[in-house]
Amino acid sequence: MAERPRHVLICSCEDTMPLDGNAVRRVCGDSVVIEGRNLCRSELDKFRKVAADGGDILVACTQEAPLFTEAADEIDGAGAITFVNIRETAGWSADAKASGPKMAALIAAAAEPATAYPWVSLSSDGVALLYGNDERVLEAAQLLKDHLDVTVLIKRPAGMAPVRVTEFPIVKGSIRSAKGHLGAFELAVDDYAAPSPSSRSELVFGPARNGAVSRCDILIDLSGDAPLFPAADLRDGYLRADPADPAAVLRTVLKARDLTGTFDKPRYIDFNADLCAHSRSKIVGCRRCLDLCPTGAIAPNGNHVAIDPQVCAGCGQCAAACPTGAAAYALPPADALLRQLRSLLGAYRDAGGKRAVLLFHDADHGGQLIDALARHGDGLPANVLPVQVNEITQVGLEAIAAALAYGASAVRFLLRARPRHDVTGLARTIALAEPILAGLGFEGARVATIETDDPDALGTTLRAMAPMDGAAKASTFAAVGGKREVMRLALREMHAVAPSPIDIVALPDGAPFGTIDVNVDGCTLCLSCVSACPTGALSDDPEKPMLRFAEDACVQCGLCKATCPEKVISLKPQLNFLAATAMNRVIKQEEPFHCIVCDAPFGVKSTVERVIAKLEGQHWMFKDASKRIDVIRMCADCRVGAMAKENFDPFAATPRPHARTTEDYLREREREQKGDN
């Protein structure tokens, strides 16, 4: 477990929820647990006294976090403060009296040290393009002209009256395509034209042209048409509103006014191109991330892909699906999330909790639903442990496996009824987890989504869950390392505590684990597959012709199958829990051919003999020429010497017939006509 803070402050919030101080103390180690009923008001001096000691503090309240932070800032030498919500998530519940273990678990998880993550900067000078169809876009521009450098692009300006004073440029055109992000939008505009300054009753435009290019920092779309970007709500700097909704337009205008300056956003994905299995030799293998990215932030870039951090919105589906760990989520990393789950479930178990259900949720949607359920309903059940993440779709198979290994009985993902972006990646993760859990004896609906915007529906669904027991003896493994290593470790630990473990579980197509089947009779040991394999699952032996396979390293990218010239390789998705400790499997091995001059081994004996059989007496270079055939039986060094000594001429073939041309045919026809006469 992580080092605990020196002081933990818990509060009954004016006796609106019961506290189980003993349960909290059992999981807080050497930390001093201080209880109160009104720490933010009449008992604030308790907090000030603790802060004056200079140690780290964990306060079990998030509503009054600004007040506690301000009080600590007034004290020299005050330690770091961490906040955790145990009121809406546990105390305000119909099961409040049984929520002691949950409170202790939430406090223990909050004590895990936060991980740092990198940032990326976006810079905007306030150059804004407003795109619309009529006078309503001009009204929005009037509200922004004193704050931003405004240009108006009107798609259908027929009958539009000219303005009395031209305070900002007004042009016509239709946006054909758009790319970029806040501070760096680039638009291709067709039917582009500027109005004549002599326009009288309505705007009259000059000659139009296609393919005009416009650049801006902020793009405000009031056209009411289809969005210009996929997952438009996630594109920084692209603001879109229905022009028929004045309130929505006003909100958009107010938001646009603040988009000037430099803004920092997290670099959500750590990408290691060396691990990417996208392609080799222009043959595409893995494209999981490309198929899932909702914003188009990922694009092919040679043998790997490239992720634009300015466009990336942090959904995390690429990281959850990446089979090699080339794309890894950074907010937080996979191993940090597993350490949080370890503390949460371990503390819950130590405090006497049973049948824990993990509820992954985000802050904007899930956090508000949980708050509403606590304030206006029965709250969360006592065995439901909420885990807030940046995006639900960032959670991968490793977190599901680790949760069940740590003793959780089930995992639920709280989604919007209408998600902001496609959640296919999460659906695929669950579809991959289901056969694994079923194969290991985890009965019932262990992993599922809850898709609702109604807090009452959330509470009803959670309380209607059939009771399921977690692992009889939970694991306590510590997760350290990259995503692929963490996933393998979590799966092995889940296998170790499973109700009825088996060694091999069949998986659906597209799974990132598996083996390969090779028709050894057709394999020539050309080793093209070895050079194509991005993970080293396929290897050779420098001493003799051999093809070996390490199942633990295979990610089922399919590059070996696509590269094989004999087409003798097929993929077989499965999860083999023995693969991590198994020796590399020898798929095919043959004797090398020994040079007839120096006896050095080279090539594959069967291949050399097959080549000789096909050429001897068949090809013009090898008819009645034993010395030429002997060249094939030599290694590269001896072959060069023999060819130089014997003066072999590779162009000494029988002269080919003269190529017939049109003139030859005409000449023959002329001779035939003369003969007839």
Image (cartoon, rainbow, N blue to C red):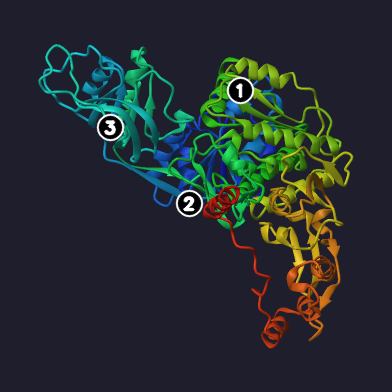
Q: Give yes or no for contact between labels 2 and 3 (Cβ–Cβ under 8 Å).
A: no
Q: Position of residue 572 (x, y in %)?
A: 80, 45
- Residue 616 visible in the current orientation: yes
Question: Callout 3: helix, strand or loop?
Answer: strand
Residue lying at the far bottom of the rendered structure: 645
Q: Is 538 or 628 nearer to us in this picture?
A: 628
The residue furthest front is 677
| Among the 4 quarters of the image, the one containing residue 168 | top left
* Residue 359 in view: no
Q: Amino acid at mark 1?
A: Trp
Q: Which residue is mark 3?
A: 128
Comparing 95 with 650, the one in front is: 650
Which mark's residue is nearer the viewer, 1 or 2? Answer: 1
Mark 1–mark 2 distance (CA, rounded to whole Å): 32 Å
Pinpoint residue 162: horizontal percent, then vertical percent.
16, 17
Q: Position of residue 290 (x, y in %)?
A: 57, 41
- List the residue tagged with mark 1: 92
**Residue bearing mark 2:** 54
Image position, residue 142 (x, y; %): 21, 21
State the CA–CA distance, disc 2 to disc 3. 49 Å
Crowding at dot 2, Cα within 10 Å, few <14 / some 14-19 / many 20+, comes out as some
SS for callout 2: loop
* Residue at the spot 58% in from the left edge and 26% down from the top edge: 88
